[in-house]
Amino acid sequence: MRIPLPREHGAWVMLCLSLLAGGILAGGNRVGASLLAATLGVLGFLAQHALREWVAGRVPIRAPLALGGFAGALLLLDSRTAEHWRWIALPLAAGIAAWTLRWYRSRGGRTRMADLPSHLAGVVALSSLSLLVAMPDSRESALAGLRLWMVLSVQFAIGAMVVHARLTGRSAFAKATMLAALVGVAAIYLVDRDARWLSLSLVFAAAALVRSVTLTRRWPLARVGWSEAVTGLAVCILGALR
C-alpha cells in the first residue's frame, strides 16, 4: 500500500517546529510521552492528506483508513488520553476545520499556493500540535501552551502571507500584517515582562526587516522558505522555553 506524502515543504517545516516546541515545553522528564504524541501528530498529518487524495480519487480508501486506525490504536494505548482529552480534541477539531475549508475551496483538487485562507487554516491546525505534544497538566502550563500556540500561529501565518505576497505581488498587505504581528507580540511582553518575551519581540522585529527585503527584492521562493525556517526555529525555541 502506497502512503501519499504531502508535497508542501512549508507544511513539513511547520509540523516539525510545532512538535519540537511542544517537546521543549513538556520538558525532559516526559520524553517517551512526547515522542508518542509526536508520532500521533505525524500520523494525523499524513491521514488528512491521504483522505484528501482519496476524495480526489488518487489513492484507495485503505490508505487513510490505515493511518487513521494506527492513530486510533496509539490513542487507546496512551494512558493519558482520558486525562488530557482536551489537548487531543483541540488539535483534532482544528485539523478537521482546516481540512474542510481546503476541500471546500479546492473541491477535491490540489490547493493552490496562493490560496491564503486555506493555508492560514492549516497554519493554525499545524501549530496546535504543539499542545498535543506538550499535554499541559496545570493551569500555568496550560496558559504557556496556549500562548505558544498563538505565537507559532502568528509566526507561521506571517510566513504564509509572505509567500502569498511573493506570488501575487501584494507586498503592502504582507507588510501591514507583519507590523500588526509585531505590535501583538510587543503587547504580550508588556503584559508579561519577561526577558524571553523581549527576545521574542526582537526576533519578530528582525524577521520583519528580513521579510521586507524579501518582498522588495523578490527573493526566489526557496530562499524565502529557508529564511522562514530559520526564523521559525528561533521563535519555536524562545516561545517554548519557560
Image (spheres, grey):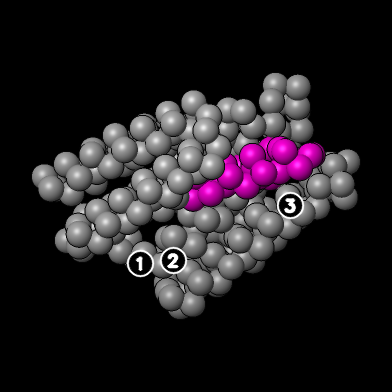
Q: Position of residue 102 (x, y in %)?
A: 48, 69
Camera-side residue of 45 and 240: 240
Q: Can residue 87 be seen in this view?
A: yes
Secondary structure, mark 3, is: helix
Magenta stretch: give its range.
129-153
Secondary structure predominantly adopted by residues drawn in magenta: helix
Q: Kindly identify the amino acid type of the residue bearing the numbered disc 3.
A: Ile
Q: Decide: is 233 above or below 109.
A: above
Q: Kindly identify the amino acid type of the residue bearing the numbered disc 1.
A: Asp
Q: Position of residue 157 (x, y in %)?
A: 41, 53
- Residue furthest left as drawn: 217
Q: Can residue 7 be seen in this view?
A: no
Marks 2 and 3 close (CB-CB < 8 Å): no
Does residue 144 show up magenta in the picture?
yes
- 92 on left or right of 154: right
The residue positioned 73% from the left and 57% from the top of the image is 89
Q: Write down the residue under mark 1.
A: 115
| Sequence-wise first label, 3 or 1 | 3
Marks 1 and 2 close (CB-CB < 8 Å): yes
Q: Residue 74 is drawn in which quadrant?
A: top right
- 103 on left or right of 96: left
Q: How crowded is mark 2: few (under 14 residues within 10 Å), some or many (20 or more)?
A: many
Q: Residues within 10 Å of mark 3 (few under 14, many from 20)?
A: many
Q: Write down the residue under mark 3.
A: 88
Q: Where is residue 174 in the image (x, y as percent from the top left)?
A: 27, 56
The residue positioned 62% from the left and 56% from the top of the image is 47
Q: Write down the residue under mark 2.
A: 118
